[in-house]
Amino acid sequence: MLIDQISVFVENKPGRLAGIMEVLRQSGVDLRAITVADTADFGILRIIVNDTDKAIEALKNDGCTAAVTKVIAFRIPDVMGALYNVIEKITAADINIEYMYSVMGKMEGRADIIIRVQDSEKAMAILKENGVMLISGDELCK
Amino acid sequence: MNYYNKNIECAPRSEIEALQSYRLINTVRRVYENVAPYRKKMDETSVRPEDIKSIADLSKLPFTTKQDLRDNYPYGMFAVPSSEVVRIHASSGTTGKQTVVGYTAKDVDIWAECAARALVGVGATKDDFVHVSYGYGLFTGGLGMHYGAEKLGATAIPASAGNSVRQLEMFRDFGSTVICMTPSYAISLIEMMQEKGFKKSDFKLRAGMFGAEPWTEEMRKQIEEGLGLKAYDLYGLSEIMGPSVSCECLCQCGMHICEDHFIPEVIDPDTLEVLPAGQQGELVFTCVTKEALPLIRYRTRDIATLVYDKCECGRTLVRMLKPQGRTDDMLIIRGVNVFPSQIESALLSVDQKATNYLLVVDRVNNLDTLEIQLELRPDMFSDGVGAIEGYTKKVKAAIDSAIGVGINVKLIEPKTLARSSGKAVRVQDNRAIKNKFEKK
């Protein structure tokens, strides 16, 4: 499913990531997924939380630069080649995956994957056609 | 001890002053007649050429600033018709406009003599191979020292700047003995030597003339040790002539000014009063032999001290101590003059809203670094790394081409730069702090 992901600009300096985590902790939101894209000079923290609005408000109040982006979440079995099978379908449809990460959690035998693409609707249609299980934010890691 | 022109370089002070007075009187008359902006300036301050009877009257004359050269861009301050001008040089200026300077054949010849004096002052003779690694072109560094080497009868090697490995090969193969370059370039050559396996014993270097940017005693030691030579301080600015307005002698205790051509004064930059000898202030020069561009009381913006004590080398020409900073906001980054306003206009040409920034200048491993810290705005931010990197690349390209020096663009979080109620602090020069520390 198409779910909300929060992207936060992180200046490349010690303690900055910890500072953002502290803001989120105090706001009482629950982290479902987290990944950091980093360059030599800055990073972008990408998170999925149980309450996007609350997290955004807390981050902005703290002076962080944050934006909400729609991403696709789907579930695959934890078997060899499972991710390839899905990616291959998306690629065959000429859809470019901008980035992807997997979600850690207490999950036996399966994995939850997040991808960001240009054309989300088309990508989701392809995933559905191929029997890939799309999941909601609430279902992440559950 | 050798001199290029002992009669002048070791003349008694009274003789130097008599010569300066004679030349000053003639110069003032000439600029009043031939340079409209000077006639206007003098008329406005009610100074007549006949009021100038000796160098004691110098302080009656109005100052000249870089702004005057800009206002009369490109040739409005020239005192001779273009048919007399044989050479143009130019230095970087603010808002894209360069400072243009011109030379007659006699100016070029005098300049060559100044450079020859400087070379002899550091022990060079006509048997030397003078390797010039200042840039050749509009910058005065390369051609200025080149003509000096030829004037002396030494062998000039016009290597120009860049291509470090080739420079080292030339040191070794051509037998370079005297080198002229920026101190930071010398440091980077030392690093290249280590990387490529050159040893100082591969070279015959014995003297280096380093200028065009501030450097420290610590760098001097490092260069002398790394290249196996004696390192001397060289000073100049295109508005007055170019390199060799002054240069250190073998005693390494301040730079002897060619004061038969350039009369120095030190002023208080706020009150504009002339300060007594030995007091630190802004250095001002009056050109008394220049034909094409005889600037009167040109404010260099360099902060320095004049020392009239006798030098052990025997020269009586006044010495200026190493400039200790600037009275304007000009930064010298790896030998290139950079004005913060140039950077700002390049930045705004890419992004009109980018008004919160800080320039951070530092010295890392003895090389100047320049960084612009830009506050990120929510409208610049997107989820992707590519878009933000694309933005910083565009900013970098615009600034690099405007100032001719590589800048590092760093995005920082919004509202992290200090806000001031008055004039925003735009420049943080960490080198100044380090210089202070190193001196102790």
Image (tube, coloured by chain):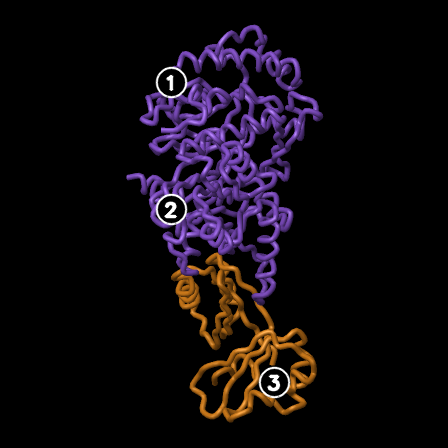
Which residue lies at the image location 43% right of the left edge and 69% below the top edge?
A28
Which residue is pictured at 62% across the width and 14% down the height?
B30
In the rendered structure, which disc, 1 or 2, sits on the residue that comes first in sequence? 2
**Helix, strand or loop at mark 1:** loop
**Which of labels 1 and 3 is toward the front?**
1
In front: label 1 or label 2: 2
B7 vs A34: above or below: above
* Residue at disc 2, secondary structure: helix
Task: Give the residue at mark 3.
Answer: A87
Of B332 and A59, the residue lying toward us: B332
The label on residue B223 is: 2
| Chain letter behind tag 1 | B
Q: Nearer the viewer, residue A8 or B198?
A: B198
What residue is drawn where x is 40% and y is 12%?
Answer: B14
How far apart in space, not on screen, are marks 2 and 3 (Cα)? 58 Å
Q: Which mark is residue B276?
A: 1
Chain B image colour: purple
- Quadrant where the N terminus of chain B is found in the figure: top left
Q: Quadrant of the C terminus of chain B?
A: top left
Colour applied to chain A:
orange
Q: Residues within 10 Å of mark 3 (few under 14, many from 20)?
A: some
